[in-house]
Amino acid sequence: MESFGYSPMRGVGQRHLIHMAFWRHNLKFLTTLQLLPALESGEETTLVGGQAVLEGVMMRSPHAWGIAVRKPNGEMVTHREKLDRPSERRKWLAWPFVRGVATLGQAMTLGFRALQFSANVALEEEQKDTPKEKRLEFSGWVAAFNIILSLGFFIAMYKFIPLLVAKWVTAAYPAMDNRYGTSLIDGVIRIALFLTFIYLTSRMKDIRRVFEYHGAEHKTVFAFESGQPVTVEHAQSYPTFHPRCGTSFLMTVMLISIPIYMLFPNFGFVQGFLLRLAMLPVIAGVSYEIIRYAARRRSSLFALMTQPGLWLQRITTQPPADPQVECAMKALDEAMELEKQLGGKLVLA
C-alpha cells in the first residue's frame, strides 16, 4: 500500500505533527498575548503607531491599519483594513481621560486581530501540504480560549496575588496594616511580578524575535515622524525606545495605581480586590493623559514619570535586523496607502 501513496500510519503521524505545531504556535501566541499591552503604541491622534506581532509588524494610521508578516522563506504576507476612530463615532469619547480608555480598548482589539493574523500565517506555513478543509487556525473557540485565559492570568497576576500577599504581610506586621502600607506593598509586588514576567519571557527565543520587531516598529515610527523619507538606513539611525510605547504605559499604570489606591480606606481583601478591578478604567485614563502629555513635553515633570517605562524598553525592544525594519516599513506603507485612498491626511503634531 505504501508504494501506491497510501499509508494510514502516515496520515496519523501527519495529524499528530500538525497538532503539535498548532499547540507550539498557540503557546507563542498566548505568551505574546500576555505582552500585548507592552508591545503596542496606540494613540487616537494624527500620529502613526504600531505593534510587534509574530515575525512581523502591524502599523496604524488614524483611519487604516496594515500588517506585514514574514514567512520562513523570506516572503512577506500583507493585509490592510479601514480603521474607525472611536471619537468620530461618539464625540464624548474624545474627552480627556475618557479617550484613554476608548483608545486602549480599540488598540487591544486591533492588537489581538493583528496577532491572530500573524499566528495564522505561521500555522498555515506548517500546514501547506495539508488539505484546506483539514487545516487548523486561530479562530473561534481557540481565540475565545486564549482571550479568557489571558484575562484570567492578568487578573490573577496583577490584581489578586499582589493584594493577597499584601494582606498576609500586613497581618504579620500590624504597623503596616493601613491604606498606605497595604497600597505600597501591593504596588511593589505587582511591579516585581511584571518585571519578572518580562525578564523570563525575554529569555525565550521566539519572544526575543518579537522584541526585535518591536524595535523595528519604533525605529520606523521615529523615521516617519522626522518628516524625512523612510528608508532602512534612516530608520536604523534611531533608538528602539519610544515615549508612546505600551511598555511605558504599563509602567505608568502600575506606578500611578499606588497613590490612587492610597486615597481609599483600607478595605478587606474582597472589597479591595473589587475596588482594584473597578478602578482599572480610571487609572488607565489618567495614565494615558500622562503619557500623551509627556510625549510632547519631554522636559516636563510628567516626563520623569515615564522614565521607568523607557528604561524597561531595554528589554521589550531589541535592535532589529534590516529585514525586520523592512517588514515594519511595508506595514506602514500598507496603512498609509489605504489612508490616502480614504482621503485622510496625516499631519505631524
Image: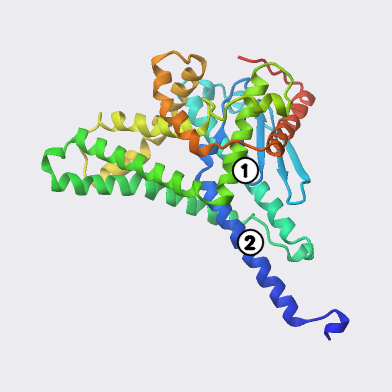
With 3 as the anchor, is 10 left or right in this view? left
Which x, y percent locates residue 145?
A: 54, 56
Disc with the residue nearer the chain's start (2 vs 1): 2
Total labels: the figure holds: 2
Q: Secondary structure at mark 1?
A: strand
Q: Disc 2 marks which amino acid?
A: Phe
State which quadrant residue 218 falls in: top right
Q: Does any portion of residue 197 appear in the rendered image?
A: yes
* Quadrant housing residue 189: top left
| Residue 110 visible in the displayed image | no
Left or right position of 58 against 1 = left
User: In this picture, is 49 found above or below 193?
Assistant: above
Other residues around mark 2 within 10 Å, as few (<14) / some (14–19) / many (≥20):
many
Classify 261 as above or below 18. Answer: above
Q: Are marks 2 and 1 in contact (CB under 8 Å)?
A: no
Report how far apart the C-alphas of labels 2 and 1 lie in the structure. 17 Å
Q: Is residue 206 above or below residue 175?
A: below
Q: Residues within 10 Å of mark 1 (few under 14, many from 20)?
A: many
Identified at 77% across, 64% down, the residue is 133
Q: Which residue is mark 2?
A: 22
User: Residue drawn 51% across and 38% down?
Assistant: 316
Quadrant occupied by the N terminus:
bottom right
Residue at mark 1: 53
Residue 228 versus residue 121: which sits nearer the camera? 228
Residue 130 location (% of width, % of height): 77, 65
Residue drawn at point x = 22 percent, y = 39 percent: 182
Task: Name the residue at the left extreme.
Answer: 175
Residue 118 place in picture, x, y as percent = 67, 47
